[in-house]
Amino acid sequence: MDVDSLLSERNPLPAGLDARIATQLTFLIEVDRLKTVLRQSPLVAAERRENDAEHSWHLALMVILLAEHADEPIDVGHTIKLVVVHDLVEIYAGDTPLYDTVGAQTQVAREQAAADRLFGLLPRDQEREIRALWDEFEARETPEARFAKAMDRLEPLLLNWMAKGGTWRTPGVTADVVRARKSTVREASGPLGEAARTIIDEGERRGWVRPAAPTS
């Protein structure tokens, strides 16, 4: 994907637009790229992989429906903002799959650079606002950020269950690895953490994920 130039340069906006509106529209055109960033998770309703925009929408809906299970009170509207913003940096940084240990080594640096570049397209006040949301999600220091991250881990779990394994079949991944990666869910919601554990356990029982290596 060519990201050296802005998408809006392919057909520049009309001259004479209000400068702030033109800047905001330029950003909104650029983030159309999110629809092209493919994740590893398989869709349930079609024979293809999920993209980042679909993932973010799904998380927003999950926040609305599952907020009642949060261990701490959360601001639902604010949490929705977090999940809508959290993957925008992958427009430039690319998706780093959960079980990609090599890509994880450079993920923070790639995503920080992408955040600087992408959010810098916005008017200064909105750059600070959106960057603060992204930073909050990454830090996971607020109840809203912890719940948003929990949804980010729970959603692909559901897709993998429906695919009878999906990315659980990644080489080197065992049921215990999946449990460890999904522990984030329990950090925000005991009930949803228990649900995630039950799904993983049953997936292991059915042979959809390799069992943990026996200890000597």
Image (spheres, rainbow, N blue to C red):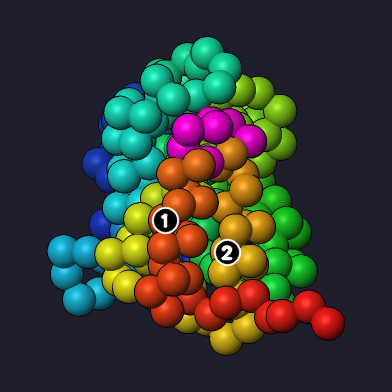
Going by the picture, which residue comes out furthest to the bottom? 171
Q: Residue at x 60, y 22 (%)?
A: 143
Q: Return the residue nearer the eye: 16 or 88.
A: 88
Q: Residue 140: x percent and y percent?
A: 67, 34
Q: Earlier in the sequence, mark 2 or mark 1?
A: 2
x and y percentages locating residue 33 in the rendered image: 37, 59
The C terminus - image quarter: bottom right
Mark 1 burial class by Cα count in 10 Å: few <14, some 14-19, many 20+: some
What secondary structure is the magenta-colored segment mainly? helix
Q: Is residue 101 above or below residue 11?
A: below
For the point 64% across and 75% down, the residue is: 212
| Amino acid at dot 2 | Val
Q: Residue at x 47, y 15 (%)?
A: 75
Residue drawn at point x = 57 percent, y = 52 percent:
182
Q: Secondary structure at mark 1?
A: helix
Magenta residues span 187-193
Kindly identify which residue carries mark 2.
178
> Which circle marks residue 199 in the picture?
1
Check the image and name the residue furthest to the left. Answer: 45
